[in-house]
Amino acid sequence: MLPLIRKFSTNQIVRFVALVLAYASIFVSCLVFSLLLRFDFSVPEQYWQALRDWSPGVILFKLIVLAVAGQYQSLLTFFSFPDAKRLFIALGVVAAMEAVVWVLLRGQGMPPRGVIAVDFILSFVGLVAMRMGMRIMRERCIGKAESLLQKKRKRVAILGAGSSGATLAREIQTKPGLGLEVVCFIDDDPQKIGKTMHGRQVVGSRRDLVEIVSRLSIDKCILAIPNASPAVIKETVRILRMRAIDHYIIPSIDQLLHRKVTVSHLRHVSPEDLLGRKPVALDNTAISELIKNKVVLVTGAGGSIGSELCRQIALFDPTKLILLDRSEPALFAIEQELAQDFKWLSIEPLAASVCNKDRINAIFKKYGPHIVFHAAAHKHVPLMERQPAEAILNNSIGTLIVSEAASVNGCKKFILVSTDKAINPTNVMGASKRLAELVVSSMQKRTETIFASVRFGNVLGSSGSVIPTFRQQIANGGPLTVTHPEVSRYFMSIPEAVGLILQSGAQSIGGDVFILDMGEAIKIHDLAKQMIELSGFVPDEDIKIEFIGLRPGEKLYEEPIHKAENVHSTHHPKLRRLVVNGDIEDINSDLEALRDRLPEMTDGEIKAWLMTKVPDYRAAG
C-alpha cells in the first residue's frame, strides 16, 4: 500500500481527499432533500431510518462510479457539455442500479422509489453547479488579470476564420500571460464576414487588410490558413511589410496532422512558404507497397537528404532500416531521433564509407537489403572544384561499389540521389554525379536489380545550401553575397525532395531517371531580398546585397534534362521519367582502373579524364 501512495504527490492526495469530501457532501444533501420533497417536508421516522441504512452504500457506490468516469483527474475549472454528459451517464448508471436493487428487495428497508429519481436529478444539478461555479470563479480571476494587462497587450488580427484560427483565438483568450489580445478575424469567405467567433467579429477580407490594420490599430497578424498557397502567403506578407506589421504563420496542414494548434506552433514566414507553387502530393499507397516489410538501406543517412529519407521511410513500417554514414556524430544523431520517435522500428546504424569495398560487401551479405537509397555524396561545388579526386572517389566510385554490391547480393531496387548539376556540367561535382548516373544506368544491363536515378534542384535548408548561408549572413548584419544578378536555381523543400525519391522508387521499372516538375526557376537575388524582408529589414538599406561573381564551376542556370533523354509521363502528374536515347557507355571498368591512379594524378589530369568520359563537361578556367 505504501509504495502505491508514494507514487502520488502530497498535493494530489490532498486534492483527492478534498474532492471525495465535496462530492460526498453534495450526495448526502441531495438524498436528504429528496426525502424531504417526497414527503412534503414531513418524513415518517421509519424512512429516516431507511435512509440512514441505505445512504452509506449509495454514496460509496457513487464515489466509485465517479472515479471510473475520471472525475477526480479532470480539471475542475474547465467544464463543458462533454463533461456534463459524462456526469449524467455516471449518475444514471447509479440510479439504474438503485432501481434494480429496489425491485429485487421490493423496497424493504429502503426509501420510496421517487426518492431515487429525485436524488438522481438533484445530484446531477449539484455537481454541475459546483463545476460551473468553479469555472465562473476562474474566468473572473482571468478577467481581472486581463484588465491589469490590457494596456500592455498586443492587438492581434487572425487571418483565417476556420478551425485553426478559432482554436488559436481560444488559446490566446485563455492565456493572458501571452500578452496578446485577439481583436478580429479576417477571411476571404463572404459567408463568414460579419459573423463572430469567440466573441470576435470577422471584419473583412484580405482585400481590406490595409484599412483594417489601420482602423483597428493592429500590432500583429497571424496567418492561420494551413492550406494557403504560396502566392496568397507572399502577397499577404508584402502588404503586412508595407505597414511594418509583425506577422507569424501556423504550420502547414501536413505539419499540423494529429496535433492541436497552439501558440507554440507559430513561426515567422520562411522562404519555404514562398516557393511559388504548392508542395507536391504523394501516392502513399505505392510508397507503402515499396517499403512495408522490407529491409531498407540508406547511405549518407546522417545528411540533410539521408536523414529525412530515414524519417519518411520509418513511417511505412520497413522490417529493418539500416543507416549507413561515415560521420559518427551525424549517424548517432539520426539513430537517436528515430529510436525516440519510432520505438517499434528495428534500426541498424553502421559507420562506414561507401568507398570501402570490402566493408560495403560485408554489410550487403549480412543484412541482404531489399531496397537501397544511395544518398551518400559530396555536393558542395566550390569545395569539390579544389579536390576533384575526392569528388570522383566518393560520388562516382562510391556509387559503383554500392551498386555492384546491391546487384551481387540480390537487391530488388537501387535508387541513386542525383542533381540537376549533372546535366551539361561546368564543375567537377556535377561531372562526378553524371558519372554516377551513367554507372547506375549501365548496371541495369547486367542485373535483375532495378536501378534508377532521381534528379532534382537545390534543396531549401540542406547543409551548405544558400538558405542557411543567407540566414547566417543576416544574423551577422550582412552583407548577403550573391554570385550574379541573373543566377537562378530550381528549389524544393527537403521533405518534398525526399518524397520525390520515394515516389520514384515506387514507379521505377529500371534504367530510368526521374525529375520533378519544380515550376519556374527562382533568381537567387530575389531570394536574398525576400529573406532580408522576412527578417524585418529593408534590402540594400538595413542589409546590403553584394555581387561577388560566379565561382569556379558555377553557371547562371541549371538544366534538369539532358539533350539525349526522352521525357515520358508517369502515374504521378508532377513526376517525369527520362529515358536515354541510344546506348549507354559502360563506364564501370574505366572507374575501376582510375581508382588506383587517382592519388598520383594532378587536378588538371583528373579534369581532362573527366572530359573524355563526360563529353558535355566543360572544366572551369
Image (tube, rainbow, N blue to C red):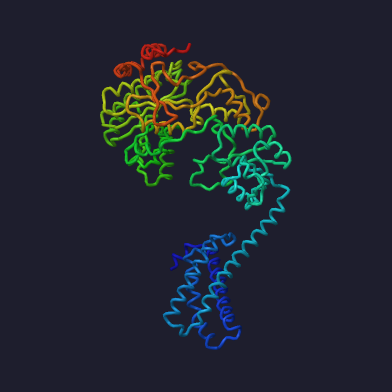
Q: Is residue 518 above or below residue 603?
A: below
Residue 429 visible somewhere in the drawing: no
Q: Is 345 situated above or below 592? A: below
**66 or 377, which lies in front?**
66
- Whether residue 342 is visible, yes or no, is yes
How many numbered discs? Answer: 0
Q: Which picture quadrant has residue 446? A: top left
Task: Name which residue lies at 56% across and 37% down.
Answer: 228
| 449 and 6: which is toward the camera | 449
Q: Residue at x 53, y 60 (%)?
A: 82
Residues 588 and 269: in front is 269
Residue at the farthest front position: 191
Residue 535, located in which quarter of the rendered image? top right
Considering the image in quadrants, where does the N terminus appear? bottom left
- Is 304 located above or below residue 551 in the figure? below
The answer to whether residue 109 is above or below residue 294 is below
- Residue ranking furthest to the bottom: 45
Q: Is residue 471 left or right of residue 297?
A: right
Where residue 155 appears, as percent x and y from the top left, is: 69, 44
What x and y, as percent, mark residue 141? 67, 59
514 or 155, which lies in front?
A: 514
Looking at the picture, how far across and down is residue 566, in whole percent? 38, 19
The residue positioned 46% from the left and 73% from the top of the image is 96
Image quarter of residue 319: top left
Image point (43%, 35%), residue name: 282
Residue 329 in the image: state x and y as whole percent.
Answer: 43, 35
